[in-house]
Amino acid sequence: MLSCARAELGSHRLSPKDLVKSHLMYAVREEVEVLKEQIKELIEKNSQLEQENTLLKTLASPEQLAQFQAQLQTGSPPSSSQSQGTTQQPAQPASQGSGPSA
């Protein structure tokens, strides 16, 4: 039964401990390759987002940039509709409408 628990690799017999170690090393190498690929993809995505960010900064008006900076300082999450000014217009008539609603 002990001989069944051992595997042969060429003419060299491996103990169960060596088999576990070998298996773990193989699994770790596989995981390292997966992580390297994920890192590569994330670096590419980061580069793409940085280029997009640079483009958006050049296209944004000074007012939009100021509004965004104010949102960053207050900690409120910026929304794409607010930066375009579409959410602010309906909010103003609602607050002027029927008095205090809060």
Image: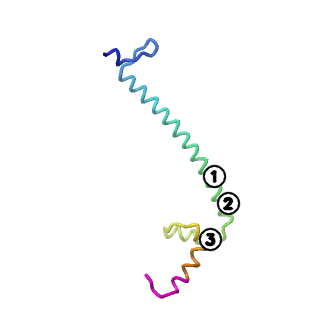
Q: Tell me if label 1 and label 3 are in contact, CB under 8 Å.
A: no
- Mark 2 or 1 closer to N-term? 1
The residues bearing labels 2 and 1 have C-alpha atoms spaced at a distance of 11 Å
**Where does the image place residue 94, in percent across and percent down from the top left?**
52, 82
Magenta segment includes 101: yes
The numbered mark at residue 84 is: 3
Where disc 1 sits, the SS reads helix
Q: How many marks are shown on the rendered structure?
A: 3
For the N terminus, the quadrant is top left
Q: Amino acid at mark 2?
A: Leu
Q: Which residues are magenta?
A: 93-102
Question: Residue 67 lies in what quarter of the image?
Answer: bottom right
Label 2 Cα neighbours within 10 Å, binned few <14 / some 14-19 / many ≥20:
few
Where disc 2 sits, the SS reads helix
Q: Residue at x 58, y 45 (%)?
A: 41
Q: Amino acid at mark 1?
A: Gln
The residues bearing labels 3 and 2 have C-alpha atoms spaced at a distance of 16 Å
48 sits left or right of 29 in the view: right
Dot in front, 3 or 2: 3
Magenta segment includes 51: no
Q: Residue at x 54, y 67 (%)?
A: 78
The numbered mark at residue 55 is: 2
Placement of 71 over or under 4, stated as above or below: below
In this figure, which residue is indicated by the disc labeled 1?
48
**Where does the image place residue 54, in percent across and percent down from the top left?**
65, 59
